[in-house]
Image (cartoon, rainbow, N blue to C red):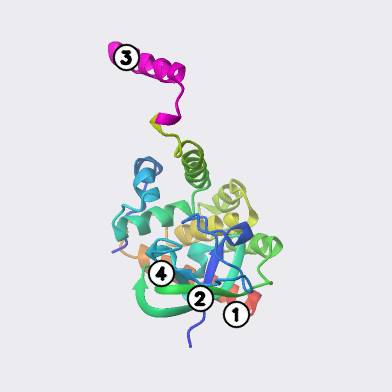
Amino acid sequence: VQRLYACLGEGAVSFLSGVRWPRPGEPNGWLRAGLDAPPHAVRGVPLETLPWWLDEELWEVELDGARTPGERCVLAERARLVARVAEWTPQVAAELVDACARRAAATPYAADVRHYAADAATPAAGAAVAAYVAAHALAGGDATVRTYADRFDEERRWQVEWLKGRLRL
Amino acid sequence: VRAAYLTCRELVELVTEYLEDALAPVDRTRFEEHIMTCPPCRAHLDQMRRTLAVVGRLSEDSLSPEAERSLLSAFREWKRDA
């Protein structure tokens, strides 16, 4: 069974949709597509794309009903939060920024990783920024170059492995 | 081939459609990819959402006659200046 996650802001609110997910134990614990939230907001994120979505709270989610493949996520008729990943903390987010900065240290974008991450409002949002900038840096910094996409994805895979190990996912 | 990364200027132009859930899936993906990696645009989206939450509830009937006159006057002046 594929484990799926939701990356949410403080209070289990999705920054992207603005929707607050019901937390485990709350009545009507399911988030229903088209009723409680726009259909594209009812989704689970596989581990393989987690670095794209990082936010303050990381939750394991359960999907129910018909599933549709989305872009770097799986859409469903309804979804609910199962358990929060307690290991994902602001401190760990800062560690990821450090790790990304070290990865990109030998590139011309070395300083950018920390610089842009520091612009973010929270450590978790900073980690998402750092992960993107590091992947961009290690891909060569020019998306029009033929090898860019492969190198970018390779660095994203490294980030997935980092999260998997650090968060014991 | 990876879709081109949305620029901040393009994102700003798409914010309203994003909030109204009117973007095509491919554009929504590019929008969200940018939002998750650009702190200033993230702040912009947050401000837009908060603004809509406050002023999105104002209806014509809720305006006082004085406020209505003031707004109409401002718009007339704006058209004259344009």
User: Is the Cβ of the residue at disc 4 closer than 8 Å to that at disc 3?
Assistant: no
Look at the picture and state if A27 lies above or below B19.
below
Q: Nearer the viewer, residue A139 or B21?
A: B21
Q: Nearer the viewer, residue B57 or A134?
A: B57
Give residue B76's mark: 3
User: Is the Cβ of the residue at disc 2 closer than 8 Å to that at disc 3?
Assistant: no
Give the extent of the magenta segment.
B61-82
Left or right of residue A154: residue A20: right
Q: Count the labels in the image.
A: 4
Q: Please give the name of the residue rendered at 52% of the width and 42% of the height, measured from the top-left corner.
A: B50
Are labels 4 and 3 assigned to the same chain?
A: no
Residue where numbered disc 2 is placed: A47
Mark 1 or mark 2: which comes first in sequence? 2
Amino acid tagged 3: Arg
Residue where numbered disc 4 is placed: A72
- Pick the quarter of the image with the C terminus of chain A: bottom right
Q: Nearer the viewer, residue A104 or B14?
A: B14
Are labels 3 and 1 assigned to the same chain?
A: no
Left or right of residue B27: residue A122: right
Residue where numbered disc 1 is placed: A169
Amino acid tagged 1: Leu
Per the picture, the main secondary structure of the magenta-coloured stretch is helix
Q: Secondary structure at mark 3?
A: helix
